[in-house]
Every structure is written in C-alpha cells, then in structure tokens.
C-alpha cells in the first residue's frame, strides 16, 4: 500500500521512512505543507501520516484541503500538540486517528494496522484463487493453508493483481504502487518481480495464474 509521510523533522522522517519501508510500505515523503498537497494531488494514497506543525501550510489546513478535494485516504496525525482542542480540531477536519509525540513504534504499528483494516472494510477480507489465499490484514499469502514465503515487494505485487482481478495493470501502474518517489529503479523491475513471483507460485503448485499481455501489462484472470 502507498503511504504519504508528512513530517518536517528530517531525523524522524528518515527513521520512519526506513521503518515503514522495511515493513513493505511504499512511502513518499513531504517536509512541508505545499509538498504534501502536491503529492496528494499526484498520487492515490491509502494512508497519510501527518504532522501538524508544518512549514508553509499548517497540517490542519493540509487536512482540511485534502478532504475538500475529495481524498478518502486514512489519516493518522502525529503531533507534539497534545491539547484537547488540537485533537478535536484534527478529528473534526477529517483525521481518523491522533498519536501524540513521542510515541513507541509498536503503538504506531498497531494504529496503522487498525486503520488499514478500516480502509479494507469495503473489500473482501481475504482474496482467494483456488488453493491460494492472500490476507491483506496480516500481509500473508498461503497455499492450501501453508505460508508462501514472499518478499514484501512480491507480496504487494500479488495483492495488487488479486485486488484488481480481471483488470489489466500496466507496468508503470504497478511500479507506482510498489515504489516510492525516492526510488532509483525503473519500472522494468516489475518484470523481474513478476518472474520471481511466478517461480515461487509454480514451486507451490500454482501455475499460469498471472497472464502477460505483451505491450499492455499483467492480470490475474
């Protein structure tokens, strides 16, 4: 899932970026309000981690503007402002949760998981294809009940294709879902991921579930 991290502290932003990326998130970063709004206008995010004390445009205004623009991304506010009126204002403007700094990464993980579950309310809780099942709430793929060992990128690729089953997904579209704006990779890396994912599925007894449309993209029929 693609996530936008909006935080003006370079130290905290880099720490969170690395921590989230290690857990399979595709993370874009913004250090101020105008940059956050530019990212929100360019990409479709499932989750936003939003600081309030931002340069340029305050986090409260960023939140109000993104909701006014129709964004349905889940928003977790991360702020040193612990006053009740700040929390109420953020929630009234469309925030889904509020976490006061400093916080433990374990608590952040549990809040993100809760928001992710809420964001999947309208989708099937588990995607199934024969004996293959993919559970987005725990980010786990299983074949006949046994875990299928996938890298974070392989898992995200498989989930994206199953989530849009029957729909053709282009290489650039898949790249945008899996890689953040800091990545130096090209979208040709998707071909490598498709190959390694197919190989792992084949070893587990699942063959030809990912179809290639030359010059167009990939889909799971």
Image (spheres, rainbow, N blue to C red):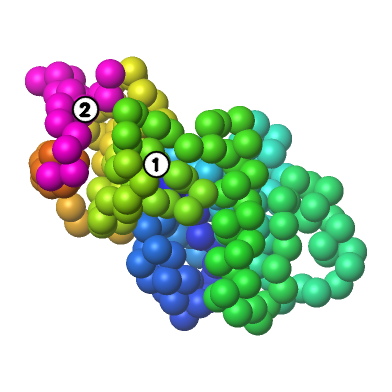
Residue occupying the point 89% across, 68% down: 84
Q: Residue 59 at x, y = what percent?
A: 67, 58
Q: Residues within 10 Å of mark 2 (few under 14, many from 20)?
A: some
Residue 17: in magenta span: no
Region in magenta: 203-221
Seen at 58% across and 58% down, the residue is 112
- Queried whether the magenta region covers residue 214, the answer comes back as yes
**Residue assigned mark 2:** 209
Left or right: residue 185 versus residue 167 is left
Residue 131 in view: yes
**Location of residue 161 with respect to 119 vertically, above or below:** above
Looking at the picture, tell me which residue is in the foreground, 44 or 132: 132
Q: In which quarter of the image is residue 206?
A: top left
The disc at residue 159 is none
Residue annotated with mark 1:
134
Distance between the alpha carbons at the discs numbered 2 and 1: 14 Å
| Image quarter hosting the C terminus | top left
Task: Please tell me whether mark 1 sits on a helix, a strand or a loop.
Answer: strand
Question: Magenta: predominant secondary structure element?
Answer: loop
Report x, y in % for residue 158. Answer: 30, 39
């Amino acid at each position: 899932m693609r996530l936008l991290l909006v935080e003006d502290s370079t130290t905290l932003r880099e720490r969170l970026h690395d921590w989230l990326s290690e857990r399979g998130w595709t993370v874009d970063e913004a250090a101020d309000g105008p940059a956050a709004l530019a990212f929100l206008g360019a990409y479709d995010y499932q989750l936003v981690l939003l600081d309030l004390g931002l340069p340029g445009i305050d986090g409260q205004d960023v939140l109000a503007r993104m909701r006014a623009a129709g964004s349905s991304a889940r928003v977790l506010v991360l702020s040193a402002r612990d006053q009740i009126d700040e929390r109420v204002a953020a929630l009234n403007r469309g925030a889904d949760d509020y976490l006061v700094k400093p916080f433990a990464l374990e608590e952040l993980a549990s809040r993100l998981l809760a928001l992710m579950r809420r964001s999947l309310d309208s989708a099937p809780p588990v995607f199934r294809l024969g004996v293959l099942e993919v559970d987005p709430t725990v980010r786990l793929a299983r074949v006949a009940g046994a875990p299928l060992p996938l890298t974070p990128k392989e898992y995200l690729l498989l989930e994206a294709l199953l989530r849009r089953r029957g729909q053709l997904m282009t290489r650039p579209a898949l790249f945008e879902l899996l890689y953040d704006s800091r990545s130096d990779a090209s979208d040709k890396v998707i071909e490598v991921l498709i190959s390694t994912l197919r190989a792992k599925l084949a070893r587990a007894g699942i063959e030809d579930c990912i179809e290639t449309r030359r010059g167009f993209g990939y889909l799971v029929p």
